Amino acid sequence: MKSPWASLLLCFACLACLAPPGAGAAPAAAPQKTLRTIFPAAETGFDPATARDLYSNHVTQAIFETLYTYDYLARPAALVPLAAAALPEVAADGKTYTIRLKHGILFTPDAAFKGRRRELTMADFVYAWKRLFDPRLASPHAWLFEGKVVGFDRLAADAKRSGRFDYDGAVAGFELLDPYTLRIHLTQTDFHLGMILAHDPTSALAREVVDAYGDAKGEVAAHPVGTGYYALGEWVRGNRIVLERNRLHLAETWDFKGDGSADDARIIAQMQGKPIGLVDRIEIAVMVEDQSRWLSFQSGGTDLFWLDGPLAPKALLNGKLRPELAARGVQLSRLMDPEITYYYWNMQDPVLGGMAKQKIALRRAIAIAHDIDEEIAIVWNGQAERVDYPIPPGVVGHDPAYRSVLQYDPALANRLLDRFGYQRGKDGWRTMPDGAPLLVHYVSRNEANGVLQAEVWRKTYTRIGIRMASERMIFSDLLQAETLCKIQSRNYQWVADYPDGDNFMQLYYGPNVHQNNAGCLADPDYDALYARSQKMPAGAARDALYHQMARRLEVIGAARMGYARYRNMLAQPKVMGYKKHPILKQEWQYIDLDPAK
């Protein structure tokens, strides 16, 4: 499909072609700069209120704008204004935020605006945030505002009772002082709201767009219209996405300081003083098969490439770029993602779930029978590091000294199962304590590393005499089933939405079931600790609560932490200014392409 924005650009091009020959010789237009990149899995749609996979959010982050974002080069990640004119003014008690918007930000042209130049206002942000609470839309991101804003939960509760959200209903906590100024009144102290307002689901959206293109749920996944650096030009679902530069975006100058490293100095020399948003066109191909992606980069058909674990040996040697690639001018940007891969067992499942002692014993036995180092070696070619703590490196609250009580010990796992009545039959397979067959369903993504993960887990279950059925699912279908608590067990990856431990500890919070709580855990002890932690700033007191919460997960066997993966990004020689950011999904607006290369 082609968007009205792409059609508008085509009209302008046609008009230029119709100019009379004697109109004078205009200077030759600069060649269009096109960046080609790859997604290793299909997108699901481009509505910021409903998109929850990494690949869709690459695109939503390019099309839409939040109030805040992160400095491109600062490490650790530093919050900076995006649509906002400045960082928020925060009251001393951390309960009132005053935010001022830049003037003159325009939505990209669209028929929904009926020919008007539509300027962004603070009301567009408030409208977008209300959508997260609309029961018809069923956004997985409602947790971002639940319990936080004065009067907001009451409006949401009314909507749940009636089945209809009142978008014109007043929220006392959202005080619009003028079209460009919003004061937010919180129910409790929160010094981290700025990071929430830098997260993609809080992006501004125009009500006219939803009214014009919303489906039965009010979702606009196929017709995104924002104020970002890019607009959707073309979309062939699960195959190809094209973004066109938004030429109406406010002019900005590239000006980042870096960390003093040689790499940052090189990037600054390439980019300092240039306009932000120099790449005219982003072409994204969806390629699930590893070898196809690698061949595309090798042949020059791809400019920016995510080299995930299975392909790492082709380009890396001891964590560095292979000499033959370096000699060609290929660039490597490498970091450990602020993410956690953890294993969950569905706490609502009749086989694995529940808090009975024998169910806890079963989950703990499976947890300690799994060899994480083996999985890192086989599935990711060593491109990951074990992480015992629920908060990964690079995120506020991480504790590198923490050691889980769930360590690899298959002999202990077998003794635990024997003790709690999971007996082996004559065929060597265990049964439930009541004699019923014991079968665990492990689900993985429908791609190459999903097959490897399933085989590693089959070895785990075989070590302790449990039959395992392997299921593979398309990623979008898997996410939907998981939200409904229909997945029994899998590897779950969570990449930081914002660089604070709260973003990871909320993954096990009971009210977040059907949102981010993939294991469907609702444990009153954990929930009480998490509720207390939300009222605290980062520091020793909050860390002490996080330790208790981590131990609670281990004691009841709700989850086992696994590892954080390295992100290896390769760029062709013509790509200038690229450095992988730990929080931003994509960095397209901050780079340039050298036409000479």
Image (cartoon, rainbow, N blue to C red):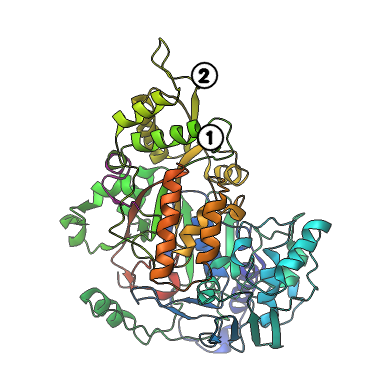
Hey, which residue is sitting farthest left in the picture? 323
The residue that mark 1 highlights is 356
Q: Tag 2: residue type?
A: Pro
Element marked by disc 1: loop
Q: Nearer the viewer, residue 572 or 375?
A: 375
Q: Tag 1: residue type?
A: Ala
Hey, which residue is sitting farthest top in the picture? 426
Compared across the picture, whether 294 is left or right of 347 comes to left
Q: Residues within 10 Å of mark 2 (few under 14, many from 20)?
A: some
Q: Nearer the viewer, residue 30 or 203?
A: 203
Q: To which quarter of the image does residue 354 belong?
A: top right
- Can I make out residue 583 in this image? no
Q: How many circles with numbers are drawn on the protein?
A: 2
386 in magenta: yes
- Identity of the residue drawn at 34% across and 53% down: 565
Residue 227 at what x, y percent from top left?
60, 76
Residue 138 at what x, y percent from top left?
69, 55
The residue that mark 2 highlights is 437
Hey, which residue is sitting farthest right in the picture? 162
Which quarter of the image is occupied by the C terminus? bottom left
